[in-house]
Amino acid sequence: MSETIFTKIIKREIPANIVHEDDQIIVFHDINPRAPVHLLLVPKKPIPTLADVAEEDLHLITHIHREAQRLAKELNFEGWRMLINVGEKGGQEVFHLHYHLLGWPRE
Ligand code: AMP
């Protein structure tokens, strides 16, 4: 798989507004937000799409969901949405698995 922009962000080769990082994932603000808060939750392992997730990767999926819960609480979201685009026809532009977390904080 050729390197995507998200790998460059993980390696700090290009800047991003990072809100969380651990040994498995990185979370940063989407450059083109489509909600009051729009984050991208990205596993460090460069899995191209959700369709490529294997049994051995399921711990990453669980971790991303747990981190989304934690961030939604920390950022005081009243409502939120998680979205994954899969494949070009599904609207995916960056072929490194990522979850969009769209949040609407309490006023
Ligand atoms: P998708 O269409 O699901 O592949 O989403 C890719 C997302 O990455 C889009 O919402 C873009 O706005 C976002 N994006 C692209 N480049 C960057 C970047 N350098 N920093 C942050 N977000 C980016």
Image (cartoon, grey):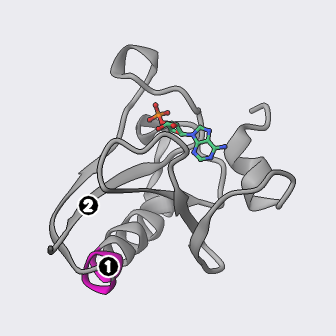
Mark 1 touches mark 2? (CB < 8 Å) = yes
Residue assigned mark 2: 103
Q: Residue 47, position in %: x, y?
A: 59, 45
Q: Secondary structure at mark 1?
A: loop
Q: Position of residue 84 (x, y in %)?
A: 34, 41
Residue flagged by tag 2: what amino acid is it?
Gly
Q: Which residue is mark 1?
A: 75
Left or right, residue 71 beside residue 1: left
Q: Residue 32 appears at what percent x and percent y?
A: 48, 39
**Residue 79 in which image quadrant:** bottom left
Q: In percent of the image, x 32 and y 85: which residue is there? A: 74
Considering only order in the chain, which callout, 2 or 1, is on the residue closer to the N terminus?
1
Mark 1 to mark 2 CA distance (whole Å): 8 Å
Indicate the quadrant where residue 67 lies. Answer: bottom left
Q: Which quadrant does ligand 1 occupy? A: top right
Magenta span: chief secondary structure = helix
Question: Where is the N terminus found, in terms of image quarters?
Answer: top right
In the rendered view, would you say 27 is above or below 93? below
Residue pictured at 46% horizontal, 27% vertical: 92
- Corner quadrant of residue 105: bottom left
